[in-house]
Image (cartoon, coloured by chain):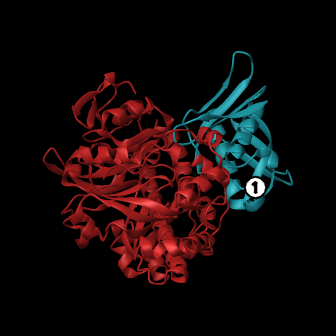
Chain colours: A cyan, B red
């Protein structure tokens, strides 16, 4: 399992790569956090449940990332670990994290929203899964 | 970009001929080096925008255009509801009504330099900036709705500013047609702690000095002279606008097919102007414009309070407030006939020329101030709207430099602390809660704003009036 960022002119692409689609979603979420702060610096002190459903898996990925953006903004939290279950274009997840501590975390930038740009959820030839899109910062 | 697909029709104007699904041509305003440096995604996105129903005249790209979401950033497109025109959440973007306002201090650089450090520290302490920053203002549900209906006018009535600020704000400080009932509970919740906050990323508050004047008459009309100190604020509608953008982008992407709209790219998500979704979006989007205007008005108040401590002689009259990410109903003459159009500007500034009825009397002869943000180490510009722009691009111009490299690459190349030290050695004091944020916004990560502004001037979109250089920068 791995996450990475990819270049987009003005913003940042987030990508999760894993053995399963659900794990790729979880890794994409770690990549989202890494836009803001080093994920390893976020302690998994409390759990926030997140559920969403969409007409297809690509919209579901955007909904999932936007749900995390919303929870970060309204709870004042950062999340560093994610457990995701997928079934029929619906998602049942737990995001683990802690309250943002500005002096300690020194967050770089806030994410405004996940976009449909470079949006893709697909199984690769080697059986691994990729989940990615560009996020607006 | 490979220019082979383009036809050069003037020194700074390139046409992307109508072909395939395009209903109108695309037009790129830029000089040759800027066009060559543009991403290949710009013509691709321009062609996609040109294929949307009801588009009028052409799809335009400003000199700072770059790869955006559906629409290029630096994109302008107008749609006519009478011929099935659409409104696009992607064509407005997430940060609805992100914009710039500039305040005239009435002071000179010589007045400010001796207290620059105290000024930087006071502004940094008083202006909520960066991820997780919160404003002091908490609105009840009724107050939130009043703010969404009243914009800057509401803020001034609450004591955040002066009545004369309003005539120096687009729309007189309040966007008509806002419908708070179309703003979701989630969007209002996301805004709860963010009234009067600057945000992060490329948002900033800068103390600047006028380094050069290019048009003495217009500069005088704007109250700008070499050596003057001004303060510019760049921010938008905060979490509320972001959430509205997120929700309507999704809804329009899902419903476009049923409305008979073939989307070449999901990010072009749109709906007929005359549809339930379209009307709900317009009501919510206009409420977000008011949120942005109120937010910049509150930040203006906090700025004035800060200056009162450090430089009590500062006048701080508002020069003007412009928005970058909007869809507005405007009358434009097309083929000799006036038409009411929904003009989308995504990362583009309105640039109404002299004599336009929507301008305050003070700008009737000069055209509206077009405020172009730069990066913290380079320069910003003040331009003036032109008559030519009214016919060339629905009265629109560029909005900034545009990034030259990704945030990831910038953070790899520079260290925030070092950027701050280097800028301090050049006389620019930066205050930011995040070193990585500063590195990602390093001056070298941006394109040359001067080239962008010169191209806008040469293309006739806006006339160059003055160059502003930073003294203090508060970064989110």
Q: Quadrant of the C terminus of chain B?
A: bottom right
Residue A93 at x, y = what percent?
Answer: 78, 44
Instruction: Name the foreground residue: B70 vs B102.
Output: B102
Instruction: Name the foreground residue: A32 vs B109.
Output: B109
Residue B75 at x, y = what percent?
Answer: 38, 43
How many marks overall? 1
Query: Image point 41% across, 65% down: which residue?
Result: B209
Decide if residue B74 is on the left or right side of residue A111.
Answer: left
What residue occupies the far right of the structure in this picture? Answer: A45
Q: Is residue B420 visible?
A: yes
Q: Is residue A108 visible?
A: no
- Where residue B212 sits, quadrant-wise, is bottom left
Query: Mark 1 — on which chain does it sit?
Result: A
**Quick one: label 1, few (<14), some, or many (20+) residues within 10 Å?**
some
Query: Image point 18% across, 66% down: which residue?
Result: B365
Query: Image point 70% across, 40% down: which residue?
Result: A31
Residue A72 at x, y = what percent?
Answer: 70, 55
Task: Kindly state the secondary structure of the residue where label 1 is placed.
Answer: helix
What residue occupies the far left of the structure in this picture? Answer: B336
Residue beneath disc 1: A105
- Where residue B217 sits, quadrant-wise, is bottom left
Q: Quadrant of the N terminus of chain B?
A: top left
Residue B44 at x, y = what percent?
Answer: 41, 30
Q: Is residue B248 above or below residue A126?
A: below
Q: Is residue B188 above or below residue B434?
A: below
Query: Image point 78% across, 39% down: which residue?
Result: A84
Decide if residue B432 is on the left or right side of residue B147.
Answer: right
What residue occupies the far top of the structure in this picture? Answer: A125
- Where residue B352 sits, quadrant-wise, is bottom left
């Amino acid at each position: 399992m791995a996450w990475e960022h990819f270049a987009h002119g003005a913003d940042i692409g987030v990508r999760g790569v894993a053995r399963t689609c659900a794990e790729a979603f979880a890794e994409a979420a770690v990549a989202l956090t890494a836009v803001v702060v080093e994920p390893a610096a976020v302690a998994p002190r409390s759990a926030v449940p997140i559920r969403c459903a969409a007409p297809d898996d690509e919209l579901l990925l955007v909904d999932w990332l936007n749900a995390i953006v919303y929870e970060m903004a309204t709870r004042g939290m950062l999340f560093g670990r994610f457990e995701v279950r997928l079934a029929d274009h619906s998602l049942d997840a737990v995001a683990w994290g802690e309250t943002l501590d500005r002096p300690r975390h020194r967050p770089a930038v806030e994410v405004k929203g996940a976009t449909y740009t470079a949006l893709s959820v697909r199984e690769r030839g080697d059986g691994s899964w990729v989940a990615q899109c560009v996020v607006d910062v | 970009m490979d220019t082979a697909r383009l036809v050069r029709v003037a020194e700074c104007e390139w046409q992307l001929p109508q072909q395939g699904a395009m209903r109108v041509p695309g037009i790129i305003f830029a000089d040759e080096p800027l066009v060559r440096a543009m991403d290949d995604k710009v013509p691709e996105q321009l062609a996609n925008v040109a294929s949307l129903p009801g588009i009028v005249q052409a799809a335009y790209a400003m000199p700072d255009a770059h790869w955006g979401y559906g629409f290029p950033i630096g994109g302008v497109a107008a749609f006519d509801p009478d011929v099935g025109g659409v409104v696009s959440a992607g064509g407005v973007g997430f940060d609805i009504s992100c914009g710039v306002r500039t305040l005239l201090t009435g002071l000179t650089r010589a007045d400010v330099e001796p207290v620059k450090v105290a000024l930087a520290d006071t502004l940094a302490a008083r202006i909520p900036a960066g991820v997780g920053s919160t404003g002091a203002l908490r609105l009840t549900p009724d107050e939130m709705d009043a703010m969404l209906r009243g914009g800057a006018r509401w803020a001034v009535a609450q004591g955040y500013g002066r009545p004369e600020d309003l005539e120096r704000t687009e729309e007189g400080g309040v966007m008509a047609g806002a419908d708070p009932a179309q703003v979701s509970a989630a969007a209002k919740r996301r805004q709860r702690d963010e009234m009067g906050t600057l945000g992060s990323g490329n948002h900033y508050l800068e103390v600047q000095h006028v380094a050069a004047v290019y048009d003495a008459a217009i500069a005088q009309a704007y109250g700008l002279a070499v050596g003057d100190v001004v303060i510019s604020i760049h921010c938008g509608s905060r979490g509320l606008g972001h959430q509205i953008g997120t929700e309507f982008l999704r809804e329009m992407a899902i419903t476009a097919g049923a409305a008979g709209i073939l989307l070449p790219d999901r990010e072009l998500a749109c709906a007929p102007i005359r549809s339930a979704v379209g009307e709900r979006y317009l009501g919510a989007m206009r409420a977000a414009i008011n949120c942005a205007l109120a937010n910049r008005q509150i930040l203006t108040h906090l700025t004035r309070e800060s200056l009162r401590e450090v430089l009590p002689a500062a006048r701080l009259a508002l020069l003007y407030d412009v928005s970058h990410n909007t869809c507005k109903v405007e009358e434009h003459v097309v083929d000799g006939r006036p038409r009411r159009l929904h003009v989308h500007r995504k990362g583009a500034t309105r640039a109404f020329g002299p004599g336009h009825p929507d301008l305050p009397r003070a700008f009737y002869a000069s055209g509206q101030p077009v405020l172009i943000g730069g990066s913290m180490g380079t320069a910003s510009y003040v331009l003036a709207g032109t008559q030519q722009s009214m016919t060339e691009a629905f009265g629109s111009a560029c909005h900034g430099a545009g990034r030259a490299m990704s945030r990831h690459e910038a953070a790899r190349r520079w260290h925030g602390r070092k950027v701050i030290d280097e800028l301090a050695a050049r006389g620019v004091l930066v205050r930011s809660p995040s070193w990585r944020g500063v590195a990602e916004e390093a001056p070298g990560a941006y394109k040359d704003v001067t080239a962008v502004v010169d191209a806008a001037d040469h293309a006739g979109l806006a006339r160059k009036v003055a160059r502003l250089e930073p003294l203090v920068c508060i970064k989110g």
